[in-house]
Amino acid sequence: MSTAAIHAGWGPAADGHRALTPPVYTSSAYAQTSHSSLKALFERRTEGFAYSRSGNPTTAVLEQRISALEQGIGAIAVASGQSATTIALCALAAPGGHVVASSLLYGGTTELLDDTLADFGVTCTVADPWDLEAWEAAFTDRTRAAIVESIANPGAQLVDLSALTDIAHAHDVPVVVDSTLASPALYRPREHGADLVVHSATKYLCGHGTTIAGLIVDTGRFDPRRRPERWQRLTAPNRRFGVTFADEYRRGGSGLLAYARAKYVTDFGTTLPAASAQQILVGMETLDLRMRKVSTDAAALAGRLHGLPGVSTVEHSSIPGRPDAHLAQRDFPRGTSGVFSLELAGGEAAAAAFCDALSLWTIAVNIGDARSLVCHPGTTTHSHLSEGQRSACGVRPGTVRLSVGLEDLEDLWADLVRGLEAAREVSTAVPATA
Ligand SMILES: Cc1ncc(COP(=O)(O)O)c(C=O)c1O
């Protein structure tokens, strides 16, 4: 993993100047040698770059690198993690399809399914991924995709992905795994049956909070040719593009991603700028080292917080009694990332006092930064959800999300202790029921 994170997709031989790191190609268009060479690109008879909205040489290096790390047959880089999820779900389920969604999802994904994709006729059933019977019962004849997070944001819940994908595959439904919190350094969804992997590369792949980016990887498990009547948009000749996208599989590529790029990336225009791709590539070089440190430090901090006065619960798989403890042992031997949450007994007032008292942890709605970050999901990332949706993913009024950065563990702990003192002062001044 750490070798591929540095070398996959680029070597000095790829460049006339033998640049060691991939150059940033800031060109909107690419000069062609003849009229017929550009025509061939538009007719999809040859490969190459015509216009950066649909592909760019720097972005292509990032696509090759994430595909190598996730053991895929191809990848697409897009402008944000949100765009990656949108395009993956549109390519599988729009128009008019049905999606089975884990109840443990990032709030933005729940909103996307609940509101915007619903506008396009995509319906959704939410199921608890820890309840396999409920998960099974959610599938219908119209289901075209299932979506789940390998480590959920913000409660760091782990899922038994092999069990969930077995059920989905029995219904011939591909599974999209949002593996943003895990990153390929900790977990490779393909090994547990995932068909597509999406990342908010904004987070750990970037690692420094500088860039918004998203990635979609096809793991090569999904083959629409097994059910051609179900996946006609891939298996039948496409009137607009004049090709059958499933032919791409015979060339070792991904028909689904070719379709997604030609249609959705190009039409929605959610292209990743080359400079952003390069920032993510630089971040990925240190991914393995960072993930080990943040995972170890998050587990240590979660353990110290557990059971302290004023702390009702700590959501981390290492905490005694968590139903996913066995999954941490079995599937996440390298750790479970630097994100976890805790619930303060004094509700939102205590959470606010806690956040405001911190000086090293910064109040910000991001995760995976080198800096440690804190936020109150109930009024930020999950604020547009109903109370029922929030409680289904473990977000309560006193819940605070922590994203452990790369600072010294004892400095981080000293700051948290200050935060807890402030939260306790509020809790004793205001009854918890208020
Ligand atoms: C798990 C997860 N998936 C997707 C996203 C969306 O990513 P982006 O902010 O890059 O659009 C986020 C953002 O917080 C996230 O935490």
Image (cartoon, rainbow, N blue to C red):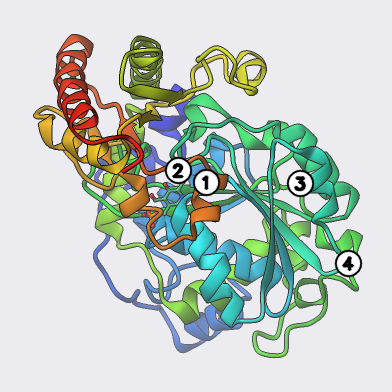
Left or right: residue 339 compared with residue 249: left
User: Whole-percent x and y of residue 91?
Assistant: 64, 69
Could you say which is closer to the camera, residue 410 or residue 219?
Answer: 410
Residue occupied by mark 1? 391
User: Whole-percent x and y of residue 348?
Assistant: 29, 43
Q: Quadrant of residue 339?
A: top left
**Helix or strand or loop: what does disc 2 sit on?**
loop
Residue occupied by mark 3? 221
Q: Quadrant of residue 5?
A: top left
Could you say which is closer to the camera, residue 38 or residue 424?
Answer: 424
Could you say which is closer to the camera, residue 152 or residue 208?
Answer: 152
**Helix or strand or loop: what does disc 3 sit on?**
loop
**Helix or strand or loop: what does disc 1 sit on?**
helix
Residue occupied by mark 4? 141
Mark 1–mark 2 contact, CB under 8 Å? yes
Q: Which mark is residue 299?
A: none
